[in-house]
Structure formats: C-alpha cells, structure tokens
Image: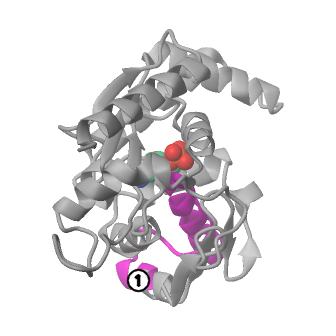
Amino acid sequence: MKHLGAREPFGERGGMFPGVGEATSYAFERRLSRRNLLGGGSEGGQSPPPRRHPVITIDGPAGAGKSTVSRELARRLGYRRLDTGAMYRAVALSVAAAGVAPDDEPALRAHLDGLTLETDGSRLWINGREVTGEIRTQEIGELTSRLTTLKPVRDTVTPIQRRLAAAGGVVLEGRDTGTVVCPDAEMKFYLDASLDIRARRRHAELTRGGVSMALDAVRKEIETRDEQDMTRAIAPLRRPADAIVVDATDLTVNEVVERMLEAVERRRCCTRS
Ligand code: DC
C-alpha cells in the first residue's frame, strides 16, 4: 500500500479515546522493561525505564462477541481498540470496487500497492474516503473471507496492524492477533461461544438490521466461516497457547468484560514487584 496508517487516536497527538492510565499500567511496563522490549534505556541504568502500555489481544470465531467486548474492554481500560477484521473488510471493499479478481495475484498486488488505508481503530478510510458504513455487507464479508486466505493481502495488512499496536495501550480483536500480529502481547484472550448461540445472536442482529434470513441458514454460514478461518494455510484461527479462554455461551457482555478485567488485574498483581 502506498500509505496505510493511523488516524486519531492512533496518531501522535492522541485523540478521542481517554488517555491510558499511568498507574494502572505500571506493572506491565516494569515487566516489559525487564524483558527489554521497550527499546532505549538500559535495565538498571541511569535513565528512567521507558514506557509502553500493554497490548491485549482477543481472538475467536465469528459471532462470539469480540467487537462488543473489545470495545467495552478498551473503554473500561482507557485503551484504544483495533478491529483487525474491519481493516480486511475495507481492503475487500476496495478490491471489489476496483473489479480486481482475487486470483489475479499481479493485479491484486498492484492494487494493494496503490491503496491508502487509514483507521482510528474502528472507523476506516480508503484513499481518504470513509468506508466504515459500507464494509458490513454479506458480499463484502464473503469476499473478505476469501481475501484473508491470500498471502499478498496478509503480507500487506499484518505489518500495519503491528505498527498500530506498537505503542501499546491497545485491545486488538480478530482471528490472528495473539498468534501472528502480536505474539508478544502481554495479555491474550480467546473468546468462544457455542455455534448455536453465535448463530442466534447473529440472526437477531440481522433481524434488527431489517435482513430476513432463516436461523438455519445463518448457522450454516457461520459454520462455513469457522471452517474457512480455521483451516486456511496462512494465519488460521487458533487459540494461542498462552491465551485465557473465555466461553461466552452463557455470559452477558458485561460478565465477559468483568472476567477479562479480573484477569488483567490478576496479571498486574503477578507482575508487580
Ligand atoms: O471479524 P470480521 O467478521 O469482521 O472479519 C472479517 C473476515 O476477516 C473474516 O472472514 C475473518 C477475517 N479475519 C482474519 O482473517 N484475520 C483477522 N485478524 C481478522 C479477521
């Protein structure tokens, strides 16, 4: 891509999200400092330890509630949020609009090279035009699923996601954020829920949005999406070995977020010295 970067609040001037609480992130910073991951300044040297706030990843299958949960978790922690799936959806929208065939690798690479994609974590702009409202259609969902299996697409988007996460103080959500994008994240969650409940939630969401689709068809679609996400060769959906699994089948959003916050707090206590 010609340029793919951050709009506020990922920009240098901060922005619409509340600032990251300094005290609450202290233990993480100490740990990062011990692991010498912060860059600059040396352990035990004269200069104060450099600062980086934690990176939290939430991976999981379609419909498990990652979007809502990550938004709320980020809000409660005062962190930024990065919806990695939305970035892929925006790329898919641009591919569709340009009429590029996913299988035509040279054309796809040329298209990606000429693309400008910006995000503030939730909203997205393609070549300067906001596309946030256009990426959630069925067609774009299907094309995204196809495109995310392709190396040129992942090779383009993953480094950008890493760059956006590098400053810390961020909750990333997606399929590979704890395994591929940020394998060194301080805190990883895998959010799961039964196929049945995910289908019911998605069905209710569609109905609210005025889309009429049989529950069985929604279930089948989610099943197909799971299969694609889990079996693809590049960056398949996997539970990171060091992730905390949260099964949201019988939990409300608030209960899920509370569990995650408790885990964050526990980790904080463990790393406090
Ligand atoms: O979460 P979502 O439905 O907006 O994701 C859209 C598609 O992108 C879905 O097929 C999974 C894929 N995806 C991915 O491959 N890697 C990510 N980190 C996020 C999403």
Residue 237 position in % (x across, y down): 31, 42
Give whichever of 47, 2 is nearer the camera.
47
| Residue 79 left/right relative to 42 | right
Residue hosting label 1 = 109
Q: Position of residue 7 (x, y in %)?
A: 65, 74
Image position of 120 with respect to 241: above or below: below
Q: Secondary structure at mark 1?
A: helix
**Is residue 90 part of the magenta span, yes or no?**
yes
Write down the quadrant of residue 35 in the picture.
bottom left
Residue under the image location 47 percent in, 31 percent down: 261
Image x and y of residue 4, in percent = 53, 80
Count of numbered tags: 1
Most common secondary structure along the magenta stretch: helix
Q: Amino acid at mark 1?
A: Arg
Picture residue at 27% right of the left edge, 36% below the top: 243
Magenta highlight on residue 42: no
Where, quadrant-wise, is the C terminus in this rendering?
Answer: top left
Magenta range: 82-108
Residue 95 showing in the rendered view: yes
Q: Answer few, some or many: residues within 10 Å of disc 1's Cα (few below 14, many 20 plus, some between 14 and 19).
A: some
Residue 71 placement, left or right of 60: right
Q: Position of residue 3 (x, y in %)?
A: 53, 87
Residue plotted at (39% across, 52% down):
26
Residue at the extreme right: 210
Residue at figure coordinates x 64%, y 57% from the top left: 122
